[in-house]
Image (cartoon, helix red, strand yellow):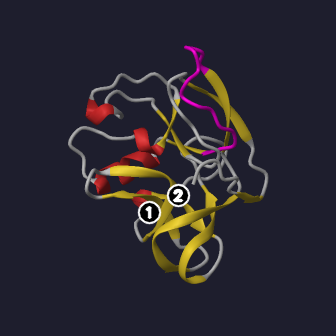
Amino acid sequence: MANVNRHIAGDPKCIGVNVLSAVTVELGDLMFLDNTDDLRNDGSSTANNNAYPFEYFRISGASLELNKGAVKSRFLGVAMDDKDGIGGGIDRNMSIAISGQFEFDLKPAKTVNIDDYFGASGTTSASDLFNQKVMKSSDSDNALGYFQERKVHAQKAWVWIKPAFGAYEQI
């Protein structure tokens, strides 16, 4: 799913956020802000206020459900740019969309309705979050936004993002 332009409609209102040189980001990745100690590396990281794709989010001993809930309050938006993790030691500002409508893969496929919540998806075997897949959620505590279309057994669906930062009303 590398480098998929997921933006469908609406003004993405991009912001520039620093990403460390060793971090790979693909166009369309869901991104979080590392603003609290112990959000990465199984809880052994120091907050550095840089952006990371969701796959880096893993708090110590947390289950997949706890990671999905905790990432909501650090959700930045969707990467509108890409960079490889071989930056020669040079950090880079990247464009992150904090508003707009996007199309994401659903994991697992579900029937979705307009205004149903969507949240982060991941693998229960390792409690890891996916960078470019979302899931239907009935819990507003895990919601990253809303579905924008009705689909039956959808493998992809349009969503409206509601990041934790920005001038927009949060869920």
User: Residue 17, located in which quarter of the rendered image?
Assistant: top right
Residue 34 rendering spot, x and y as whole percentages: 45, 31
Q: Residues within 10 Å of mark 2 (few under 14, many from 20)?
A: some
Magenta residues span 78-91
Residue at coordinates 29% horizontally, 51% vertically from top-left? 127
User: How many tags in the picture?
Assistant: 2
Q: If the image is split into quadrants, where does the N terminus sit?
A: bottom right
> On the picture, is 100 further left or further right than 124?
right
> On the picture, is 45 further left or further right than 136?
left
Kind of element beneath mark 1: helix
Distance CA(mark 2)–CA(mark 1): 7 Å
Above or below residue 143? Residue 44 is: above
Whether the residues at callouts 2 and 1 have beta carbons within 8 Å, the answer is yes
Above or below residue 78? Residue 17 is: above
Residue 163 rendering spot, x and y as whole percentages: 57, 48
The residue wearing badge 2 is 171
Earlier-in-chain disc, 2 versus 1 = 1
Q: Is residue 66 magenta?
A: no
Q: Main secondary structure of the magenta part?
A: loop
User: Residue 44, located in which quarter of the rendered image?
Assistant: top left
Kind of element beneath mark 2: loop
Residue at coordinates 55% horizontally, 78% vertically from top-left? 154
The residue wearing badge 1 is 140
Above or below residue 169? Residue 48 is: above
Q: Which residue in the rendered view is the most extreme toward the top?
A: 89
Residue 45 rendering spot, x and y as whole percentages: 33, 25
